[in-house]
Image: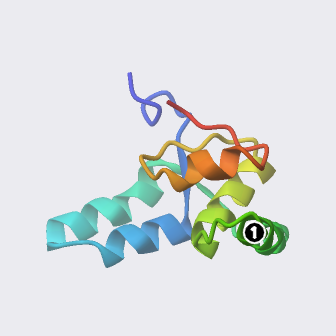
């Protein structure tokens, strides 16, 4: 049973926007939009954006220039007690410096 079927999956607006941006067809767009109907959507958070800025600065000082979006997703996940499920290796790098849980 998938995390979504178990009611344990969540997403946020910026992930839906990124999926829409990468859509190659109307079917892909519809699938991305349906995510908000079938998955809990985390609310945008000023605190997570602030933490993302601090995290991005920390990572840059350590020689890792990471996207602000990835830092925001990590901060939002931590704020909501959620784990990140992604193939993006940046989250592994972030988890070494930040209390981010990764779902394998």
Q: For the N terminus, which image quadrant?
A: top left
- Can you give x and y, in whole percent of width and height, for residue 19 in the image? 36, 67
Asked if residue 24 lies left or right of residue 65, the reply is left
- Can you give x and y, in whole percent of width and height, for residue 13 in the image? 54, 69
**Which quadrant of the figure has residue 29?**
bottom left
- Can you give x and y, in whole percent of width and height, for residue 54 in the image? 83, 70
**Which quadrant of the figure has residue 31?**
bottom left
Q: Residue at x 80, y 66 (%)?
A: 58
Q: Which residue is mark 1?
A: 52
Q: How is the image coloured?
A: rainbow
**Which quadrant of the figure has residue 68?**
bottom right
Asked if residue 52 lies left or right of residue 94, the reply is right
- Can you give x and y, in whole percent of width and height, for residue 39 in the image? 49, 48
- List the single residue furthest toward the front: 63
The mark total stands at 1
- Name the one closer to the observer, 38 or 47: 47
Q: Is residue 18 above or below residue 11?
A: below
Q: Residue at x 63, y 60 (%)?
A: 73
């Amino acid at each position: 049973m998938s995390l979504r079927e178990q009611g344990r999956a969540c997403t946020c607006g910026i992930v839906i926007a990124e999926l829409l941006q990468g859509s190659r067809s109307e079917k892909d767009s519809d699938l991305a939009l349906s995510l908000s109907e079938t998955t809990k959507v985390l609310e945008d958070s000023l605190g997570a954006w602030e933490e993302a800025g601090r995290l991005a600065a920390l990572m840059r000082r350590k020689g890792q220039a990471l996207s602000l979006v990835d830092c925001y997703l990590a901060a939002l996940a931590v704020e909501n007690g959620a784990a990140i499920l992604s193939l993006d290796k940046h989250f592994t790098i972030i988890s070494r410096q930040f209390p981010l849980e990764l779902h394998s």
